[in-house]
Amino acid sequence: MTECNSQIHLFSIGRRTVTAAFDDVRLTFDIGVSLLHRIDKRLGLSDRLAAAMIDRRDPLRVRHSLRDLLMQRIALICAGYEDANDATTLRHDPAFQLALGRVPGEAALASQPTLSRFEQRPRRDLLSLSNVLLDLWVERLKRKAKKSKKRPRIILDFDSTDFITHGDQQLNFFHGHYGNYIYYPVLVFDQHGFPVAAVLRSGDTRTGGVCAVLMRIMEKLSFALGKFDLLVRADAGFSMPELYKLCDTMGIRYVVALITHKTLTERAEPWMAEARKLSEETGEPARLLREFQHRWGRKDGGLHRIIAKAEVTTLGDNPRFLITNMTEPPEQVYETYTGRGQGENHIKELKCAMLGDRMSCHAFAANQFRLLLHTAAYVLMFVLREEIESLSTTRMQMDTLRLRVLKVAAVVKVSARRIWLHMSAQHPSASLFKYLGAALAPT
């Protein structure tokens, strides 16, 4: 049989020919994912996630453990392979074998069909995995509280976003605001950007499941911390009397945006007139913050504190309204709420950098499982970024972190006593990789 020539002659430089060849060399351009192995071990992430799942497979036929399947899928997501489509090719990649704690070349990882079957999880597993991710966050709070010896002050940002679906996914519906068929998840991050909850919802949901998520978080916090201060921030999509009542009952402070409508604008008209006059006198935009009491919602007849922003910009009137049980002055309440904008960046990283909106499965439960996998990948990248934040005054975005740390080429050589990773000394992130290697080394 004729042997195919894998050499490609590109061009010449003088008398030398530049030749490319696809050889059977242990070469990878994702060697940075091997660092995720140390972070995973430190957190115990894949082990804890695997322990929370029920393995219904025949033990005599199992080649890949639940832990290995989880870690392989999470490592692929961190490296930018959001689907399992590339798994069959990358199952022989030495970087991903190292990320799973395997010696490169000894045994191949799982293929695409195996990972696709793995994603079909029962609902019981989904709740258990969600609790594992929530426990990771609570344990972080406990460690910080023990170190600082101060009462934890927690801010939770509740938000939702559109996960556009491009197929016949279960429970995807057309959403008029986004003009597409979507899922509409509820995502919760703390003030530092650590993910607390990620719950997939059907595309026609507005506020469903929010109170249940908050109650589950409160249960975990109350059991683990005892005393703490909790503030919930949310946009107008979460404005509902049930949430206000729950927060008031459980002693949770909240500040939530309200949809601007006629009743509120009429109440704020005197302040808007004052802001217009001030803007005309100064020739600059003007903003006034005022407050009033108002009965809000048909299901809740009680009075609520409303913060009104009467603002006039170069584009015209810009009134905004917040509902809150905070007792601070209106200026401080509004400043607290505007900090919620950072939560949009966390969602952007989950969607764009970690490709968390890739809902390609038909079954709704399988897509919820995918969301949890992407959230777990976000956790690993978040902790990896924390390791290098002391080196720079600017916070690196996760897609930049992937390019600078994970997407590093290396030749992998295995000997009897060592596994060598030969990388270019001229790589722009060589010093950063050395620092992380030392910081994440076993103690």
Image (spheres, rainbow, N blue to C red):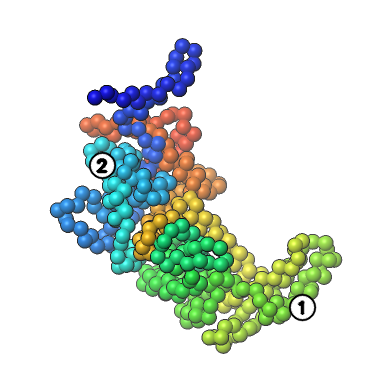
Q: Residue 270 shows which numbered tag?
A: 1
Which residue is situated farthest in the bottom direction here?
A: 301
Identified at 66% across, 71% down, the residue is 320
Q: Disc 1 vs disc 2: which is toward the camera?
A: 2
Q: Estimate how packed mark 1 is, as few (under 14), some (14 to 19) or many (20 or more) residues with alpha carbons within 10 Å.
A: few
Tell which of 25 and 222 is nearer to you: 25
The residue identified by callout 2 is 108
Provide the secondary structure element on which disc 1 rests.
Answer: helix
* Dot 2 crowding, Cα within 10 Å, few <14, some 14–19, many 20+: some
- Spatial CA span between label 1 and label 2: 71 Å
* Relative depth, front residue between 424 and 180: 180
Q: Is mark 2 on a helix, strand or loop?
A: loop
Contact between marks 1 and 2 (CB within 8 A): the answer is no
Amino acid type indicated by mark 2: Ala
Q: Residue furthest right?
A: 281
Residue visible at 48% across and 50% down? 353
Mark 1: which amino acid? Pro
Residue projecting furthest to the top: 15
Q: Residue at x 14, y 53 (%)?
A: 60
* Residue 196 occupies quadrant: bottom left
Report whether residue 106 is seen.
yes
Question: Vertically, is 36 above or below 213?
Answer: above
Q: Where is residue 96 in the image (x, y as percent from the top left)?
A: 33, 42
Residue positioned 54% across, 56% down in the render: 345
